[in-house]
Image (cartoon, helix red, strand yellow):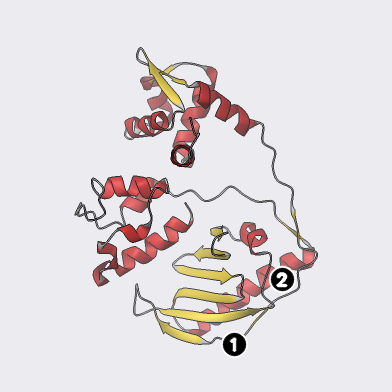
């Protein structure tokens, strides 16, 4: 199992959920029946979680009981043996300043709010190390960007030094957000050490599904929006496959999904 990219995606999707990790740990001590598992995690979504784990090859069913597969045992053993990463070194980083706000424009999702562009100097080459400084944030290697979410406000810092902020009320609020950003980063640089990397924020399947159009139009070539959400969560397709999200009335949904999928 997990010998090719698609199988690996299924395993990663299966283990990205707290409930499914709880099931796997519960099965570490041996066979369990579905009633026992239901008492631990609740019965409402039990069948769905067990199906995902089975498709990933992590569990097997045998005479009314559930057990870890051989691959599941190996996977759990490997995870248990991993050590925490060491703290990150900031000693070579220089304090940053925020250049003048360069652009204010209406947000696509909400025209009463603003989208702000600014610049951070010097550009940070340590964006990934900054991730633990913010409670809800995610670093993207592909885009070399750090997305930070605080309430409705979404801030993206790029490796080039560009800073983009969405859902801002006015210029004064933008200045407050940028000043707070600068303070948090410079305090970490002054200490010379960043906090240890934390576990990634997990997005639940229903978090994705509720922002999809839910029309089951089949234009994405999937069986419906729920199936689309599953494939999106397991990274087997991308958000742009949903044609309806490109329509103006779904602009708000699309913006939320763009943020959520950054955490997958």
149 on left or right of 211? right
SS of the residue under disc 2: helix
Left or right of residue 180, residue 253 in this image: left
Q: Callout 2: few (<14), some (14-19), or many (20+) C-alpha neighbours within 10 Å?
A: some
**Residue identified by numbered label 2:** 186
**Position of 235 relative to 243 (above/below):** above
Residue corresponding to mark 1: 100
Q: Position of residue 163 (x, y in %)?
A: 56, 75
Asked if residue 43 shows in the view, the reply is no
Query: How many numbered markers are drawn?
Result: 2
Real-space Cα separation, disc 2 to disc 1, in angstroms: 18 Å
72 to 186, vertically: above or below: above
Tag shown at residue 82: none
Residue at 66 percent of width and 68 percent of height: 184
Q: Nearer the viewer, residue 176 or 182?
A: 182
**Residue 72, image x, y percentages:** 51, 26
Residue 14 on image: x %, y %: 45, 37
Residue occupying the far front of the picture: 4
Depth check, front residue: 215 or 31: 215
In x, y percent, where is residue 180?
61, 73
Can residue 255 be seen by looking at this rendering? yes
């Amino acid at each position: 199992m997990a010998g090719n990219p698609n199988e690996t995606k299924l395993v990663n999707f299966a283990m990205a959920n707290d409930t499914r990790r709880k099931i796997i740990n519960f099965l570490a001590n041996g066979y369990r029946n579905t009633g026992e598992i239901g008492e631990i995690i609740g019965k409402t979504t039990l069948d769905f979680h067990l199906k995902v784990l089975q498709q990933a090859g992590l569990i097997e069913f045998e005479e009314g009981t559930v057990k870890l597969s051989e691959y599941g045992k190996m996977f759990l053993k490997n995870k248990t043996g991993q050590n925490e990463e060491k703290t990150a070194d900031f000693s070579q980083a220089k304090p940053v300043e925020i250049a003048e706000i360069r652009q204010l424009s209406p947000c696509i999702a909400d025209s009463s709010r603003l989208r702000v562009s600014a610049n951070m100097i010097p550009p940070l080459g340590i964006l990934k190390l900054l991730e633990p400084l913010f409670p809800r944030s995610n670093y993207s290697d592909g885009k070399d960007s750090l997305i930070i979410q605080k309430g409705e406000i979404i801030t993206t810092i790029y490796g080039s030094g560009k800073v983009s902020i969405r859902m801002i009320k006015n210029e004064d609020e933008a200045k407050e957000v940028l000043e707070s950003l600068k303070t948090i980063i410079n305090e970490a640089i002054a200490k010379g050490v960043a906090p240890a990397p934390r576990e990634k924020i997990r997005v639940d399947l229903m978090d994705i599904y509720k922002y999809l159009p839910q029309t089951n139009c089949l234009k994405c070539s999937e069986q419906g929006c729920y199936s689309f959400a599953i494939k999106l969560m397991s990274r087997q397709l991308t958000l742009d496959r949903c044609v309806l999200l490109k329509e103006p009335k779904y602009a708000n949904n699309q913006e939320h999904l763009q943020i959520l999928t950054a955490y997958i």
